[in-house]
């Protein structure tokens, strides 16, 4: 199981690498309210001390548990009868002195009413100061990145070239002239011009030259700072054969970061895109005197027939005094009431659940695109004999243009020290989005053993569930008007409901009959009726065969589904940006992309097969080995097409994809691309999981070893551009979507523990792989470096007991860990945080108390 970090500072279970939205998370067998509008559950929402264990079921489980269990189920089992107090305090920091983090947790349980009742309460508080951008690490300061080569067909070089020392060539924080005779004139914060030293230029990027530290990763945190509070409580009361229970959860995560803001790339031809170059006319009064003199000199000495210089393109990095302050809040609330018990030999349970997730995003300093364009287009008027800067639109002969420009304050783009506070206020605003998702669940289950076969009792379970989920998103008026340069959301109010029923049977067929020490079969079927997505059947059939005390075989065949989530159905249209390599213009540039939900989506359908064995040899007590093969084929995968994929398909002649592209001039740049959610693709993956564990007494304690390995030999995504097997395509920024998976990962643990102390060593191996599985020499997919080296990370931990009373389950212990003991850097050209450690060596220590 991969536990993936999320930009929202959460951790999400992701079985088989199919995405967290295809792994179902349960708590005591019940759905947990999603902590996001994409249906995923942050595992941090459950206080650690309340967890007894976690059960992981790999392979399709939709027939038993419902939608989303395509890759499997993670069922978190809570402690039932814990009595006493459990607490922990810890703090940590990286070797570099950043990334400080701390966590405090406290909880307790007690019985009441002469043991008929039990209450369990707990909470956690954590804070992480995060880690800054890549320039905070030696490996990041090397500035590994790729440049785009649109002329690959003629210059003999790959279309994508990885290199060190890659940064922007067409913009600077204080401004850069990128066209005409003054190309290369850059400015200091005060507006003093200097000659920019270009390196080897590739579109908006360059290798070498000036501008070190100004790149795609400037301001992008390695680790997000955040603050989290989590509380959870449960009460149970037994009366006769019935147990009444209630649970409640509350969690809140806050994080605030600084963001660079919108960049204006100076090399791109002017267009309506927010990221296009700025056009500065030469009558702009803010042009520094030295530059104005150079313009006058050029116009006076230009060759006959050469047009005068009346404007130039200008690149501008969004860092100046407009640095955006981005604040987000994610709050989750869940309540459950129910009862369980027996009626004769029949076990039953019913419960009702309400949950809600509230998400608020605010951005201070978000650029108002229309105001920005007006404010930087400056000319002069004469007042009382003095030339005064004025926004050009205020002098327009068009009354509507003048009215729209009312209140415009001229903005000086030459140097970050020069804009006035009034100008900054005019071109920026508060971007605000408030979003709320809710989930209501009513469910009931019955379980019985109504009869027996010659091999034992037959178990039958059945049940029904009703679930309703809603999404409401309210943007600020400016966002609703799409006034900002990026991340505009729209109003949405949507809901879906589903009614489900299932039956599951477990039947033994043989017992103590030769090589059939035990043989049973199981089957399940579920019918689900979705209010929007139609009806669907899921099923599974499996067999477990124990040949003897040492060897057990198992296999399951299933049909599973994942219904579209609230975001995929109702997401309001919002605009972000993407970088494309455009064969039409032979250039690489950034375009605005607009994504939106789709009410016509149908559920994804998966056909899965798993088969494996468990071997526990009598000749080696404590040794266990298991191997499980899996094959999953998902049809109608719901996703948004990536901008480059859409463009490539259009160039290849796909008219449907061309319809998603806005290109006002057939030979010009793209101004906008639509990326709606669609049932686009087919996903096939297969591989094998291995587990080897051993435990033995040694001296005064126990020695244990465990090795978990997964080998993936097929991870094929079929989309509009064809089928590509991305197993062994290790994630990198160049292949961020669609992503591949590492084909071989190994996790090993060696531990020794006594009553008084314990030590453990963990090793994590990530196999080497490709940068791009679809790379073909001489085409737009070609790349100069197509190999990522393997990595091994080591973590060391230890604990020592200060006090222990095993009979009463009381203890006080100190613990410490060192993550990434060897301070191993991520391999280039990859710095993906899912697999690789980006922080470096880090230390953590604390104390645990149980009383």
Image (cartoon, rainbow, N blue to C red):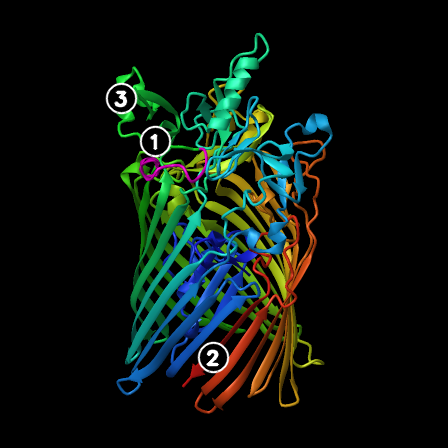
Which quadrant of the figure has residue 692? bottom right
Disc nearest the viewer among 1 and 2: 1
- Position of 228 compared to 183: left or right? left
Disc 3 versus disc 1: distance between alpha carbons? 27 Å
Q: Earlier in the sequence, mark 3 or mark 2?
A: 3
Which quadrant of the figure has residue 387? top left
**Residue closest to the eye, 695 or 12:** 12
Residue for badge 1: 371
Q: Is residue 500 above or below residue 725?
A: below
Helix, strand or loop at disc 1?
Answer: helix
Which disc number belongs to residue 384? Answer: 3
How far across and how far down the image is residue 613, in percent? Answer: 64, 66
Q: Check if residue 418 falls in the magenta segment.
A: yes
Disc nearest the viewer among 3 and 2: 3
Disc 1 versus disc 2: distance between alpha carbons? 55 Å
Which disc number belongs to residue 847? Answer: 2
- Position of 132 compared to 463: left or right? right
**Residue closest to the eye, 715 or 742:** 742
Query: Magenta segment range?
Result: 414-427
Helix, strand or loop at disc 2?
Answer: strand
Q: Is residue 25 above or below residue 282?
A: below
Disc nearest the viewer among 3 and 1: 3
């Amino acid at each position: 199981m991969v536990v993936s970090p999320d930009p929202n500072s959460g951790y999400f279970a992701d079985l088989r690498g199919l995405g967290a939205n295809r792994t179902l998370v349960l708590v005591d067998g019940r759905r947990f309210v999603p902590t996001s509008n994409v249906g995923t559950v942050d595992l941090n929402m459950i206080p650690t001390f309340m967890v007894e264990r976690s059960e992981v079921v790999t392979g399709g489980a939709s027939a038993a548990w419902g939608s989303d269990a395509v890759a499997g189920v993670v069922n978190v089992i809570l402690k039932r009868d814990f009595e006493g107090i459990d607490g922990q305090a810890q703090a940590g920091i990286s070797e570099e002195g950043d990334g400080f983090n701390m966590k405090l947790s406290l909880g307790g349980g007690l019985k009441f009413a002469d043991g008929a009742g039990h209450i369990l309460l707990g909470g956690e508080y954590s804070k992480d100061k995060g880690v800054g951008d890549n320039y905070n690490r030696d490996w990041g300061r090397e500035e590994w990145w790729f440049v785009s080569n649109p002329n690959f067909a003629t210059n003999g070089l790959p279309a994508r070239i990885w290199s060190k020392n890659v940064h922007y060539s067409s913009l600077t924080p204080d401004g850069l002239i990128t066209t005409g005779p003054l190309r290369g004139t850059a400015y200091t914060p005060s507006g003093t011009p200097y000659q920019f030293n270009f390196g080897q230029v590739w579109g908006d990027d360059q290798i070498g030259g000036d501008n070190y530290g100004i790149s795609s990763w400037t301001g992008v945190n390695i680790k997000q700072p955040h603050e989290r509070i989590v509380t959870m409580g449960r009460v149970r009361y037994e009366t006769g054969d019935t147990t009444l229970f209630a649970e409640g959860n509350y969690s809140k995560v806050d994080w605030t970061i600084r963001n660079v803001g919108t960049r204006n790339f100076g090399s791109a031809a002017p267009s309506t895109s927010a990221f296009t170059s700025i056009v500065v006319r030469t009558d702009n009064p803010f042009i520094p005197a030295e530059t104005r003199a150079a313009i006058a000199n050029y116009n006076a000495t230009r060759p006959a027939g050469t047009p005068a210089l009346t404007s130039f393109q200008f690149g501008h990095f969004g860092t100046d005094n407009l640095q955006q302050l981005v604040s987000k809040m994610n709050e989750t609330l869940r309540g459950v009431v129910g009862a369980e018990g027996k009626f004769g030999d029949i076990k039953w349970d019913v419960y009702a659940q309400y949950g809600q997730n509230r998400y608020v995003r605010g951005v201070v300093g978000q650029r108002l695109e229309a105001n920005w364009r007006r404010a930087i287009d400056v000319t002069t008027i004469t007042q009382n004999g003095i030339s005064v800067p004025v926004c050009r639109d205020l002098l327009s002969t068009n009354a509507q243009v003048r009215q729209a420009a009312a209140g415009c304050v001229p903005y000086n783009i030459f140097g970050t020290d020069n804009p006035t506070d009034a100008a900054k206020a005019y071109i920026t605003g508060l971007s605000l989005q408030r979003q709320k998702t809710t989930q209501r669940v009513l469910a009931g289950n019955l379980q019985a053993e109504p009869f027996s076969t010659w091999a034992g009792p037959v178990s039958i379970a059945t049940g029904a569930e009703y679930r309703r989920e809603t999404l409401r998103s309210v943007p600020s008026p400016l966002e609703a008007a799409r006034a900002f340069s990026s991340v505009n959301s729209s109003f949405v109010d949507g809901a879906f409901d589903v009614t489900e029923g299932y039956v599951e049977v477990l039947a033994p067929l043989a017992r103590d009959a030769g090589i059939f020490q035990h043989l049973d079969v199981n089957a399940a079927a579920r019918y689900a009726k979705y209010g929007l997505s139609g009806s669907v059947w899921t099923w599974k059939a499996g067999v477990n065969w124990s040949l003897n005390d040492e060897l057990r075989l198992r296999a399951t065949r299933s049909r599973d589904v994942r219904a579209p989530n609230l975001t995929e159905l109702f997401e309001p249209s919002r605009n972000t940006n993407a970088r494309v390599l455009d064969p039409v213009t032979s250039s690489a540039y950034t375009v605005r992309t607009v994504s939106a939900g789709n009410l016509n989506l149908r559920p994804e359908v998966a056909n899965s097969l798993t088969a494996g064995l468990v071997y526990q040899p009598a000749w080696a007590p404590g040794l266990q080995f298991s191997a499980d093969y899996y094959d999953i084929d998902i049809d109608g995968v719901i996703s948004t097409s990536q901008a480059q994929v859409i463009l490539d398909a259009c160039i290849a002649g796909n008219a449907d994809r061309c319809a998603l592209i806005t290109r006002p001039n057939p030979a010009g740049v793209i101004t906008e691309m639509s990326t709606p959610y669609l049932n686009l693709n087919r996903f096939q993956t297969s591989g094998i999981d291995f587990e080897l564990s051993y435990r033995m007494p040694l001296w005064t304690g126990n020695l244990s070893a465990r090795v978990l390995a997964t080998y993936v030999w097929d991870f094929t995504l079929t989309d509009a551009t064809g089928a590509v097997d991305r197993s062994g395509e290790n994630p990198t920024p160049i292949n961020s979507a669609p992503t591949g998976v590492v084909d071989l990962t190994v996790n090993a643990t060696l531990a020794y523990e006594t009553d008084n102390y314990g030590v453990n060593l963990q090793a994590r191996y990530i196999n080497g792989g490709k940068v791009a599985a679809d790379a073909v020499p001489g085409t737009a997919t070609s790349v100069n470096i197509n190999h990522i080296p393997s990595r091994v990370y080591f973590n060391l931990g230890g604990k020592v007991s200060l006090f222990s009373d095993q009979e009463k389950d009381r203890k006080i212990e100190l613990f410490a860990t060192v993550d990434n003991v060897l301070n191993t850097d991520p391999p280039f050209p990859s710095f993906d945080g899912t697999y690789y450690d980006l922080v470096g060596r880090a230390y953590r220590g604390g104390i645990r108390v149980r009383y």
